[in-house]
Structures are given as C-alpha cells and as structure tokens.
Image (cartoon, helix red, strand yellow):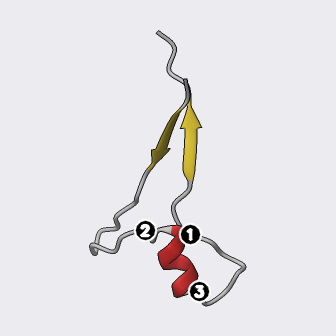
C-alpha cells in the first residue's frame, strides 16, 4: 500500500515553501513552481 508524503521546506529566515494553492494565488511566473509536491512511496517490511 503506497503512502503519500508532502515535505515543506523552511529557510533560515523562517519563510515556508508554499502549498500548491498558495503558490497559485501568488503566481508571478509560471516558469518556476517552487510549491510542495506530493510523493508516493512504498515501504517494504
């Protein structure tokens, strides 16, 4: 069964990586999307 992970980066100044919704609301350029991305992983055990 796959698990979904979403990481959110925080820089030294306390700035937080935007969610896709936050990014879409503040889009300045579609050339760079620095929003979070969901990833699916499988853990064997």
The crowd level at tag 3 (other Cα within 10 Å; few <14, some 14-19, many 20+) is: few
Q: Which residue is drawn at 53% across and 77% down?
A: 23
Q: To which quarter of the image does residue 39 belong?
A: top right
Q: In this view, does 13 lie to the left or right of 39?
A: left
Residue 35's x, y, as percent? Answer: 53, 67
Q: What SS does tag 1 mark? A: loop
Q: Of the residues under marks 3 and 1, which one precedes in the sequence? A: 3
What's the mark number on residue 17?
Answer: 2
Alpha carbon distance from label 2 to label 3:
13 Å
Q: Is residue 26 left or right of residue 9?
A: right
Name above or below for residue 34 compared with residue 27. above
Residue 14's x, y, as percent? Answer: 27, 72
Q: Marks 2 and 1: in contact by CB < 8 Å? A: yes
Residue 10's x, y, as percent? Answer: 34, 64
What's the mark number on residue 27?
Answer: 3
Q: To which quarter of the image does residue 12 belong?
A: bottom left
Residue position marked by numbered label 1 in the rendering = 34
Q: Of the residues under marks 2 and 3, which one precedes in the sequence? A: 2
Q: In this view, does 32 lie to the left or right of 18?
A: right
Q: Which residue is drawn at 57% across and 38% down?
A: 40
In this rendering, the count of numbered labels is 3
């Amino acid at each position: 069964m796959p698990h979904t992970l979403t990481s959110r980066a925080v820089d030294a100044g306390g700035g937080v990586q935007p969610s896709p919704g936050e990014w879409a609301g503040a889009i300045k350029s579609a050339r760079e999307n620095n929003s979070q991305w969901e990833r699916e992983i499988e853990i064997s055990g």
